[in-house]
């Protein structure tokens, strides 16, 4: 089994793909305490969701930011 590359999604803008907030944008706060999921806060909410990448959320890409900034 090949190891997955380690990436840090902390601080990244994301799109929530599953659950009650599917379709909402938010921010990834970092790894959850158990290290198995990521803590994601939907915009304009006081909630923190435990989501798995890439099944439950994906990174947002800003085409105006240019290739090197996404």
Image (cartoon, rainbow, N blue to C red):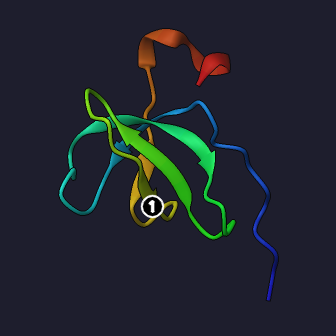
Q: In what quadrant of the picture does the N terminus appear?
A: bottom right
In front of the other: 62 or 45: 45
Q: Residue at x 81, y 75 (%)?
A: 3
* Quadrant in the rendering for residue 47: top left
* Quadrant in the rendering for residue 45: top left
In front of the other: 1 or 10: 10
Q: Work out whether 37 lies above or below 23.
A: below
Q: Position of residue 53 (x, y in %)?
A: 52, 60
Q: Work out whether 34 lies above or below 15.
A: below
Q: In screen coordinates, is 50 left or right of 16?
A: right
Q: Residue at x 66, y 69 (%)?
A: 34
Q: In screen coordinates, is 46 left or right of 63?
A: left
Q: How many numbered markers are drawn?
A: 1
In front of the other: 29 or 47: 47
Give the labeled residue for mark 1.
51
Q: Position of residue 23 (x, y in %)?
A: 20, 45
Q: In what quadrant of the picture does the C terminus appear?
A: top right
Q: Residue at x 41, y 47 (%)?
A: 48
Q: Secondary structure at mark 1?
A: strand
């Amino acid at each position: 089994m090949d190891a997955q590359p380690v990436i840090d999604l902390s601080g990244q803008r994301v799109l929530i793909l599953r659950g009650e907030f599917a379709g909402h944008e938010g921010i990834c706060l970092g790894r959850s305490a158990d290290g198995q999921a990521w803590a994601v806060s939907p915009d304009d909410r006081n909630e923190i969701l435990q989501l798995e990448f890439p099944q439950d959320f994906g990174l947002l890409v800003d085409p105006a930011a240019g290739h090197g900034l996404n």
